[in-house]
Image (cartoon, rainbow, N blue to C red):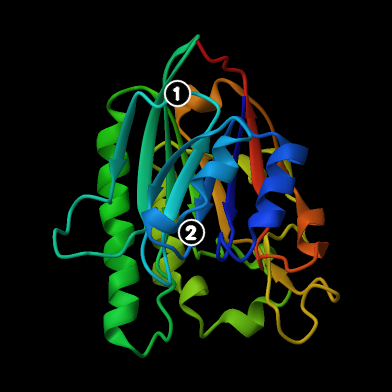
Amino acid sequence: MKIVTWNINGVRARLGNLTHWLTESAPDIACLQEIKTVDEQFPRAEIEALGYNVEIYGQKGFNGVAILSKLRFDEVIRGLPGDDADEQARFIEGVFSTDKGALRVASLYLPNGNPIDDEKKFSYKLSWMARLERWAEERLMLEEALVLAGDYNVIPEYIDARFPENWLGDALFQPQTRQAFRRLKNLGFTEAVRAVTDAPDTYTFWDYQAGAWQKNNGIRIDHLLLSPEAANRFSSASIEKHVRAWEKPSDHVPVAVELAFAPI
């Protein structure tokens, strides 16, 4: 079973790329972030025509997450618990039936947090990460296969940036941000890409500015975390880097994991 995360950076602006990619890559479950549209304006018909079930947690103009699945949804939950005042659409989870039991997949779009001298924005990022950690701790107690897929807006280590010195003042690379990501992983998750490679120049995001893509000036901020039950079925992980070279691309590329599950 192929599960992929992709920050699409505007689903309506990149619908052609999305449908082409769904046909080419053929994920069983695709987790999208930054769809930038309300639920009613999501191009549901075009996606369903390709054989996908669609669940959305949208927001006008920015944010928004979705899960596209060839499997039928058993359950869908929208929003990360822990703050009833948080109206930003950044989290959706789906539950599916497989030959090995329940599979739970979350699509998340973690706050950027910049600028770091804006206490409100950076504290929102850290509080959101703390909520995610509490949620994950509770979900792990279910002992289900769980995949946390998304744009984390976290550069975990120096190796995950072409020029890490350029990110020292950025919220994505602050010690508090990286520590929060480590705490999440240390609950018992396997980080899929780093489970298969420790190579440098392994990136998922290239800015639109200053020829970042052409110069391979990238960072790795899109991650797939696997619970022990999912990691036990782990086959491979990959970054579909070629998508960044398409016309009108997102500044992120899809990141995929293969798990030895079959739908029922």
Residue 120 image-quadrant placement: bottom left
Apparent side of residue 250 relative to residue 132 in the rendered image (left or right) = right
Residue 263 percent across, percent down from the top left: 53, 15
Q: Is residue 44 above or below residue 38?
A: above
Q: Is residue 160 above or below residue 47?
A: below
Measuring 18% from the left and 53% from the top, which residue is drawn there?
A: 82
Closer to the camera, 240 or 65?
A: 65
Q: Which residue is mark 2?
A: 152
Residue 87 image-quadrant placement: bottom left
Can residue 179 be spotted in the picture?
A: yes
Apparent side of residue 72 relative to residue 45 in the rendered image (left or right) = left
Residue 73 percent across, percent down from the top left: 40, 27
Can residue 199 be spotted in the picture?
A: no
Residue 136 image-quadrant placement: top left
Number of marks drawn = 2
SS for dot 2: loop
SS for dot 1: loop
Q: Is residue 15 above or below residue 217?
A: above
